[in-house]
Amino acid sequence: MLFFAGCSGLSVAADAEKGVVTVPRAVVDPVNAGSIMQLLAGLILVVALILLLGWLVKRYSGLPGQNKALRVVASLPLTTREKLVLVQAGDQQLLLGVAPGRVNLLHSYDQPLIEPGVAMGEFASRLQQAISRKESE
């Protein structure tokens, strides 16, 4: 009975004849300013640590987008799952066919097909011109 009374947070009544002693329990408010400040400080520390680690991984690893020699010049969706991508690789431009699970080199251009930063509408017309020139050869 003492065990159950102690676990439930109730104090045991004193009975002088049976030799039972009252066990007073100090009631501590679990939500006070100190515990809230400690919780917020821990949360801020964890978020800051996550952001710092993310920045370090991005800065010092070979994640995609870190290579300045390769960049996507333009992209043309063919279907919902397939597209043509023109990639600038050094001084060459590569026309890639991208589909789920594979990437195929369609053509390599020594002269730039389009300059980086040109509007996407011009990419489609220039690509059509290049394809028609290749077919006429």
Image (cartoon, rainbow, N blue to C red):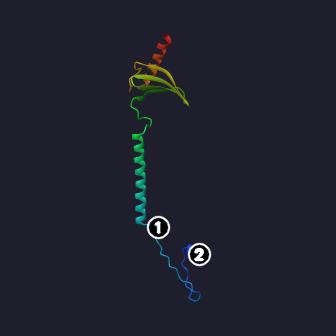
In this picture, is 26 found above or below 75? Answer: below
In this picture, is 73 found above or below 25? Answer: above
Q: Position of residue 108 (x, y in %)?
A: 46, 20
| Residue in view at x 46 percent, y 27 percent | 75
Labels 1, 2: front one: 2
The answer to which of 125 and 107 lies nearer the viewer is 107
> Which residue was labeled with disc 2?
3
Residue 114 location, quadrant: top left
Which disc, if any, is residue 119? none
Q: Position of residue 54 (x, y in %)?
A: 42, 45
> Which residue was labeled with disc 1?
30
Comes first in the chain, label 1 or label 2: 2
Query: Mark 1 packing: few (<14 Cα in 10 Å), some, or many (20+)?
Result: few
| Total count of labels | 2
Query: Which amino acid does the dot numbered 1 rest on?
Result: Pro
Query: Mark 2 packing: few (<14 Cα in 10 Å), some, or many (20+)?
Result: few
Disc 1 versus disc 2: distance between alpha carbons? 23 Å
Pointers 1 and 2 in contact (C-beta within 8 Å): no
Q: Quadrant of the N terminus?
A: bottom right
Query: Which amino acid does the dot numbered 2 rest on?
Result: Phe
Q: Position of residue 102 (x, y in %)?
A: 54, 29
- Drawn side of residue 92 relative to residue 102, left or right: left
Q: Dot 1: what SS?
A: loop
Q: Dot 2: what SS?
A: helix
| Residue in view at x 40 percent, y 51 percent | 48
Q: Position of residue 121 (x, y in %)?
A: 43, 24
